[in-house]
Image (cartoon, rainbow, N blue to C red):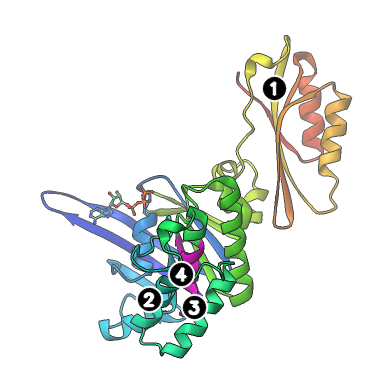
Amino acid sequence: MIELQDVSKIYPRRGEDPVVALENISLSIESGEIHGIVGESGAGKSTLIRCLTALERPTSGSILVDGKDLSTLPSSQLRDARRTIGMVFQGGNLLDQRTAAGNIAYPLRIAGQGKALTRTRVTEMLDLVGLGDRARAFPSELSGGQRQRVGIARAMADRPSVLLCDEPTSALDTETTDQILGLLKDVRDTYGVTVLIITHEMEVVRKICSEVTLLDHGRVSATGKVSDIMETIDSPLARRIVPEPEFDPALTPADSVVLDVSFTARQGEPTGSRVLALASQYGADISAGTFETMGDIQVARLALSIPTEDRHDLLSALEKVGVSAKERAL
Ligand SMILES: Nc1ncnc2c1ncn2[C@@H]1O[C@H](COP(=O)(O)OP(=O)(O)OP(=O)(O)O)[C@@H](O)[C@H]1O
């Protein structure tokens, strides 16, 4: 479990105002959750990771990992506490001169684990990430996805309780991204590890995060279960996670307007069919649409084109069934 209590990080600058990189961050992440941290460049994501790995101490507040306060531990105990945290970096960040097995063994050697345990763990981790036959390959002989698999194996080798992933899928293609995200989920399922992912890719949030936090100028601007965030379908974070579908307004028929219609539905709720029936009843057509299944909810954003004169009737019919809709300014 990770708990941040009122964490602030202020960088002093000579002759200039200090930079407040993190301001009163409070977050509680239960064991076994997959929590995404998103935010614009400069929002404080890297600073948060550095504080969580105790590479930096926060200016104030406390950071507890499995009940241990990393911000006050003396250096002598910090090394052991750090072993409870595994790090996955962008692109794998492997040691080029070591084989896949050598990279995975490295943190175990540093931690002083014996040869026999190291050997068993390396085999177990290579199997876990599906690279049992590539133990002797050097990073230059592996694909980007395989390098990241080794990165995950290395991070898990010393059995951490927390896995911090810093942009784990950036620079990977969609298919490889899916495989790496699937692997992170499997790792969580197998070892019950708490996963924190810093990402700028909303796809990561959609596909594997159970919870998400949006950082904005060093503050928590929104946080919660992804399904709860998506229920407030018009919130800025919900729009960022599942944006409105793009389409070319030039294709809208003459004398028509576009309505943006958004809704969520739990399994078995007929909201989608109700919306489509109303659209058809009022002569609307689907110009573009996005459907996402995220955990136990479905999220839909549709752009409906409708004859201008019928738009108010459809808007009020949708409102009656509790579906958010508004006219798009073209
Ligand atoms: N060592 C430092 N000294 C001074 N300011 C810093 C330092 N590290 C970060 N900052 C500032 O703190 C703020 C947060 O930076 P941070 O790198 O955490 O953002 P980020 O969300 O990770 O951005 P990106 O997505 O671009 O990596 C920025 O204004 C940055 O300039």
Secondary structure type for disc 2: helix
Tell me the CA gap for discs 2 and 3: 10 Å
Question: From mark 1 to mark 2, how far is it between C-alphas?
Answer: 57 Å
**Could you tell me if residue 292 is visible in this image?**
yes
Q: Which residues are magenta?
A: 149-165
Mark 4 and mark 2: span between their CA atoms?
14 Å
Distance of mark 3 from mark 4, alpha carbons? 12 Å
Towards the viewer: 254 or 250: 250
Residue under circle 1? 258
Q: Residue at x 64, y 47 (%)?
A: 232
| Residue 43 counted in the magenta span | no
Q: Where, by quadrant of the figure, is residue 6 drawn?
A: bottom left
* Helix, strand or loop under label 3: helix
Kindly identify which residue carries mark 2: 106
Which residue is pictured at 62% across the width and 51% down the height? 206
Mark closest to the chain's N terminus, 4 or 1 = 4
Give the answer, above or below, for where 108 lies relative to 272: below
Residue pointed to by mark 3: 122
Going by the numbered disc 4, the residue's amino acid type is Arg
Judging from the image, what secondary structure is the residue with disc 1 in?
strand
Disc 4 or disc 2, which is closer to the eye? Answer: 4
Task: Decide which of tag 1 and tag 2 comes sooner along the chain.
Answer: 2
Give x and y (percent) for residue 192. 59, 75
At x 66%, y 55%, the residue is 227
Secondary structure type for disc 4: loop
The local crowd at label 2, few if under 14, some if 14 to 19, many if 20 or more residues have their Cα within 10 Å, is: some
Which amino acid type corresponds to the residue marked 3 in the rendered image?
A: Val
Q: Kindly identify which numbered label has been placed on residue 136.
A: 4
Work out whether mark 1 precedes mark 3 in sequence or the reverse, and give the earlier one. Answer: 3
Task: Indicate which disc, 4 or 2, sits on the residue closer to the N terminus.
Answer: 2
- Which label sits in the foreground, 3 or 4? 4
Q: Earlier in the sequence, mark 2 or mark 3?
A: 2
